[in-house]
Structures are given as structure tokens and as C-alpha cells.
């Protein structure tokens, strides 16, 4: 049997896929057809695009970021042709969707959207957060439309205290975009908590002012957070992409800002109750700690007092004993001194038979001071006598 040259299915499908990837004519093409079998799966949508002679599968990844077609509607699909090698499926990957019938205007807007997107005006990292509890809200819209009634009714149903200020402005027709852009600039300087730009649904031509560079620049440059609420839920305008938040409808925009006052009051009451309980618990704990500390301090003081009283008594006893010892010692020493004084007292000596001799009132201290014939005075403890020296002996 002769050898048969072959390739695998995977090799074939990968080769076909690479051909599609390499073929520039199959990128960024626009295909006209009717939408059939539209279904949503998570962030993606899938449907079939068909005409009277053929059909092809369409993958619309991140479908919410662009026009959402209706079942049976004819649309222009800007897309890349894709061949999925794993199951050999040919399909279109959507870049943008434009309703048929809008003609050159739709194509022009698609190009302008791509330009603005490339310049960063729709960058989600630049979006400002909405305040959680706005007090002053400006609404830029036409005062003659039903939009005002919807916003006021919805807001007041939840919240009677928000200050809603309406800035009347044309929302369609020639020159409306300049009025809108100017209104945004003026209101932005008035320090509102947020701004709602709103109008009801309409055709592509009716919504045209919201698909212009003027309004995109005004929204992007505003310091105040802006909610875009233009058209119906399926309508997407440039103002939606440029705004900080997109609301599907004006009513939805009102619901975004109209926090429930009752819920907020209850929230703060709950916080106050929790704080009261926390404060009472802290007071109770502090009281217990105070009682324990007071008891410890009292016991410590009592122990200190008793210890010091005992110490003082011991010291007093020691001091008394010391004084007694000092007194006894002093008394003993005094008695010894008295004894010594008694022993050296001349009167005591005189009583033992001693006398002292004077010659001419001068005390005689040595026999050498006495001569035979001297008259001397002899003094004793009980008197004196006068005598005459008859003999002097020096050798006794």
C-alpha cells in the first residue's frame, strides 16, 4: 500500500487560523446583516448575523460598552473575522455595532468615538467617585420634558432634604451641544456635590448633542462628579463614556443620589446606640477598676500606717531605752565625779588633819620658803592659827 501524505486536524485548523490572522483584509471590516438569536452570557453577547443567502456567528465581548442590537434588527458590524482552531468555527469578533439606517452619521460617530477613546477621554481610571450623601445636586436638562418630573418624584420618594436645582438647557437640536457644554462649565464652578445631565430617549439625531466633542471635553474637565443619564437603557452616548457614572435612565440617576433619609437616620441611631453601649461598658469597667484601685490603695495605706506605727513604737522604745541608758551612765559618771571631787575637796583634806601655810598671805609650797623666826599663818577647815618657826629641817 503506497504511503499517504496527511496532516492532522489541529494542523489544518491552526494553518487556516494563521491565514485569517495574517490577512489584513479580514480586519476592521464592516458587515451588514440581521441580528438573530441574540443571547447574553456574563459580560459577553452572542448572536447570528444573517441575510437572505447566508449566516455567520458573532461574538460581542463586553457588549455593554456599545450599542446593544435588538432581535431582527439590521446593523453594521465593525469586526475582525476569526477562525477558532479548536472547533473549526468561523465567526466575527465585534469592534463596534451601528444600527442600519443612520448612514454616514453613524459611521462618523464611530470614528469620532474611536478618536476620543484614543485620546483618553473615556479612561475609567480618571473617574471621580460620587459623594455618598450629596446635599446639593444640580440637574442639567430641559425644564419642559418629563425627565424633570421623574427625577424629582424619584428623589423625593427617598429623600425630602436634598437640594435639587434645575438648570434649564436645550437637549436636542442645532447648537444644543454648546449650551450643554457651557451649562456644565458654569454649574461646575458653583460647588455642587454632583451634577446630573439628563434627557429622555430618542433617535440618533435626537441624542446627537450628547455625542459631540464639546460635551465630552466639558464633562472630562469638570471638577464636580457627573452622572450621565441620557436616553433609554440601551442608548449609549459619548457623555455616558466621559461621565464619572453612567445611569441607564434619568430615574436611575435619581436613585443613585437619593439616599434614604430614614435609612440614614436609622444608621446613625444604630451607631449612637452602639457608642452608648460602648461608653456604658467603658464607664462600668472604669468604675470597677476604680473600686479595685481604691481598695488596693486603702489596704496599702492601712498596711503602711500599721507598719509605720509599729516601726515608730519600736523606735520610741529604742529611744526611751537609749535615754534610760544615757541617764544611768550619766548618773554613774556624775557619782564618780562627785566622789573624785570629794576626794580633792580641800575641806575633806583638811578634815584629815591637813592645813596650808601662809607667810604674808602667800601660800608656802616648799620648806625652802620658810626660815627660822618666820611668822606663819596656819589654816584648817574650821579656822586658822598664827605660829612662829623655831626650826627648819630640809632632809625629811
Image: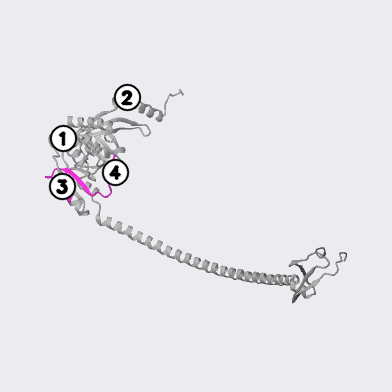
* Whether residue 317 is visible: yes
Dot 2 or dot 1, earlier in sequence: 2
Mark 1 is surrounded, within 10 Å at the Cα level, by few (under 14), some (14 to 19) or many (20 or more) other residues, namely: some
Mark 4 is surrounded, within 10 Å at the Cα level, by few (under 14), some (14 to 19) or many (20 or more) other residues, namely: few
Q: CA distance from mark 1 to mark 4?
A: 26 Å
> Who's the residue at 82% across and 69% down the image?
389
The residue nearer to you, when weighing 384 against 266, is 384
Which tag is nearer the camera, tag 1 or tag 3?
Answer: 1
What residue range appears in magenta?
A: 127-152
Residue 329 location in percent, x, y? 69, 70
Mark 2 is surrounded, within 10 Å at the Cα level, by few (under 14), some (14 to 19) or many (20 or more) other residues, namely: few
Q: Secondary structure at mark 1?
A: helix
Q: Secondary structure at mark 3?
A: helix
Question: Contact (CB < 8 A) between labels 4 and 3?
Answer: no
Which residue lies under the disc numbered 3?
A: 148
Q: CA distance from mark 2 to mark 1?
A: 43 Å
**Is 311 displayed left or right of 396 in the figure?**
left
Q: Which mark is on residue 178? A: 1
Dot 3 or dot 2, earlier in sequence: 2
Which residue lies under the disc numbered 2?
A: 23
Amino acid at each position: 500500500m503506497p504511503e499517504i501524505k496527511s496532516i492532522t486536524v489541529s494542523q489544518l485548523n491552526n494553518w487556516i487560523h494563521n491565514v485569517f490572522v495574517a490577512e489584513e483584509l479580514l480586519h476592521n471590516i464592516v458587515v451588514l446583516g440581521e441580528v438573530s438569536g441574540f443571547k447574553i452570557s456574563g459580560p459577553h453577547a452572542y448572536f447570528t448575523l444573517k441575510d437572505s443567502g447566508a449566516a455567520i456567528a458573532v461574538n460581542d465581548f463586553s457588549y455593554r460598552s456599545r450599542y446593544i442590537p435588538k432581535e431582527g434588527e439590521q446593523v453594521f458590524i465593525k469586526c475582525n473575522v476569526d477562525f477558532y482552531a479548536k472547533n473549526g468555527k468561523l465567526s466575527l469578533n465585534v469592534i463596534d455595532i451601528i444600527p442600519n439606517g443612520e448612514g454616514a452619521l453613524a459611521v462618523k460617530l464611530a470614528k469620532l468615538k474611536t478618536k476620543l477613546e484614543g485620546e483618553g477621554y473615556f479612561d475609567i481610571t480618571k473617574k471621580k467617585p460620587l459623594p455618598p450623601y450629596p446635599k446639593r445636586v444640580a440637574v442639567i436638562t430641559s425644564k419642559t420634558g418629563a425627565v424633570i418630573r421623574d427625577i424629582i418624584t424619584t428623589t423625593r420618594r427617598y429623600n425630602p432634604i436634598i437640594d435639587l436645582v434645575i438648570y434649564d438647557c436645550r437637549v436636542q437640536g442645532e447648537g444644543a451641544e454648546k449650551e450643554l457644554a457651557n451649562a456644565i462649565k458654569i454649574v461646575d464652578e458653583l460647588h455642587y456635590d454632583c451634577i446630573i445631565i439628563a434627557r429622555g430617549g430618542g433617535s440618533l439625531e435626537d441624542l446627537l448633542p450628547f455625542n459631540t466633542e464639546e460635551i465630552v471635553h466639558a464633562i472630562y474637565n469638570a471638577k464636580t462628579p457627573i452622572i450621565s443619564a441620557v436616553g433609554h437603557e440601551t442608548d449609549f452616548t459619548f457623555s455616558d463614556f466621559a461621565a464619572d457614572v453612567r445611569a441607564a435612565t434619568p430615574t436611575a440617576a435619581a436613585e443613585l443620589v437619593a439616599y434614604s433619609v430614614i435609612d440614614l437616620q436609622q444608621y446613625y441611631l444604630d451607631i449612637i446606640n452602639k457608642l452608648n453601649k460602648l461608653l456604658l461598658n467603658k464607664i462600668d469597667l472604669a468604675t470597677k477598676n476604680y473600686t479595685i484601685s481604691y481598695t488596693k490603695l486603702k489596704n496599702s495605706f492601712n498596711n503602711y500606717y500599721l507598719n509605720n506605727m509599729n516601726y515608730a513604737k519600736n523606735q520610741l522604745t529604742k529611744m526611751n531605752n537609749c535615754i534610760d541608758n544615757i541617764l544611768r551612765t550619766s548618773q554613774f559618771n556624775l557619782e564618780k565625779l562627785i566622789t573624785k571631787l570629794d576626794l580633792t575637796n580641800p575641806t575633806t583634806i583638811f578634815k584629815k588633819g591637813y592645813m596650808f601655810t601662809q607667810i604674808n598671805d602667800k601660800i608656802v609650797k616648799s620648806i625652802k620658803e620658810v626660815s627660822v623666826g618666820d611668822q606663819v599663818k596656819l589654816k584648817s577647815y574650821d579656822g586658822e592659827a598664827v605660829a612662829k618657826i623655831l626650826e627648819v629641817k630640809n632632809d625629811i
